[in-house]
């Protein structure tokens, strides 16, 4: 089948512009328990790398959003995201030999559409959220043998100005630009704590076998 569940660990919430936690993920943060069926590759190392890359990407977004938001206002940020969000994730990904994707069931940009593996992860997180269970990052192998790191993206208060309720959380001027750039936008109506989507970080190097 498309993938094998290998491991799921610490609770972590990563998202564009949500994360004020400046602490770096440290190697010794990893929990002590070993998985029952030890995978053939170093899942822990992929998980650490995935988390660092997601955090780094998030920080890039956040600093850009703050910079442009302060200078030109939120509608300009929407324009910026429209022109640069995917380019930004692509260029950070290329620098780390990974493919970085943010996806969701409620999309703003249809180019971020989930594939079948991402849908499965999204469904799993949605179920966990409903059952009040933690949504933990996972490392999975796809049918072609590529390792993926997935982590939930949760909605924070700050996201609501572009993903909340139009007219209430989203200012009219901002919503106008959103509708103009994304006529098919489905990414509104969220509230803090909702599952906005997931990170999918695909490692292009298949040869990182480690004991
Ligand atoms: C200034 C407005 C703005 C803010 C604030 C904002 N977003 Fe977005 N978001 C956008 C736009 C515009 C896109 C579409 C980007 C693209 O074209 O790829 C988007 C896309 C996304 C996507 C990709 C999936 C999709 O629907 O295309 C995720 C995930 C996401 N946002 C999460 C968040 C989270 C989480 C926060 C808060 C931490 C946040 N956003 C804050 C405007 C915003």
Image: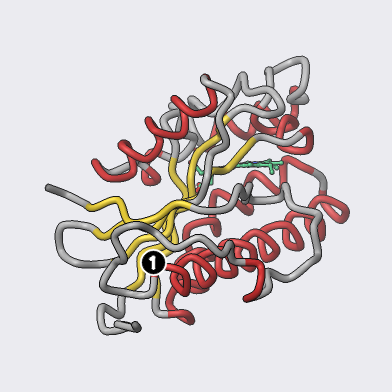
**Residue 34 vertical position relative to residue 157 in the rendered view, above or below:** below
Between residues 29 and 101, which one lies in front from this camera angle? 29
Quarter of the figure with the C terminus? bottom left
Q: Which residue is mark 1?
A: 99
Check the image and name the residue furthest to the right: 70
Q: What residue lies at 74% left-to-right and 52% top-to-bottom?
A: 19
Q: Quadrant of residue 94?
A: bottom left
What residue is at 32 percent from the left and 37 percent from the top?
119
Q: Is residue 198 above or below residue 200?
A: above
**Residue farthest along the left direction in this orientation:** 1
Is 36 rendered above or below residue 98?
A: above
Residue at position x 47%, y 74% in the image? 45
Q: Position of residue 164 (x, y in %)?
A: 68, 24
Is the C-beta of the residue carrying label 1 under 8 Å from the nearest atom of ligand 1? no
User: Ligand 1 lies in which image quarter?
Assistant: top right
Q: Which x, y percent locates residue 158?
A: 78, 38
Q: At which x and y percent is residue 201?
A: 42, 61
* Helix, strand or loop at mark 1: strand
Report crowding for label 1: few under 14, some 14 to 19, many 20 or more residues within 10 A (C-alpha).
some
Would you say 199 lies left or right of 12 here?
Answer: left
């Amino acid at each position: 089948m498309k993938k094998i569940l290998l491991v799921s660990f610490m609770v972590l919430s990563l998202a564009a512009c949500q994360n004020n936690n400046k602490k770096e993920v440290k190697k010794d943060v990893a929990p002590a328990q070993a998985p029952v069926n030890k995978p053939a590759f170093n899942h822990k190392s992929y998980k650490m790398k995935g988390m660092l890359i997601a955090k780094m990407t998030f920080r890039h977004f956040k600093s850009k959003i703050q910079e442009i938001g302060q200078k030109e206002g939120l509608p300009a940020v929407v324009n910026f995201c429209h022109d640069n969000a995917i380019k930004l994730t692509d260029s950070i990904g290329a620098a780390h030999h990974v493919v970085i994707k943010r996806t969701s069931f409620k999309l703003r940009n249809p180019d971020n559409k989930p594939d079948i593996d991402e849908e499965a992860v999204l469904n799993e997180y949605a179920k966990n959220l409903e059952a009040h269970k933690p949504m933990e990052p996972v490392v999975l192998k796809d049918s072609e043998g590529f390792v993926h790191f997935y982590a939930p993206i949760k909605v924070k208060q700050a996201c609501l100005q572009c993903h909340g309720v139009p007219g209430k959380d989203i200012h009219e001027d901002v919503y106008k630009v959103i509708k103009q750039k994304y006529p098919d936008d489905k990414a509104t109506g969220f509230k803090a704590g909702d599952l906005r989507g997931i990170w999918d970080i695909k490692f292009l190097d298949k040869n990182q076998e480690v004991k």
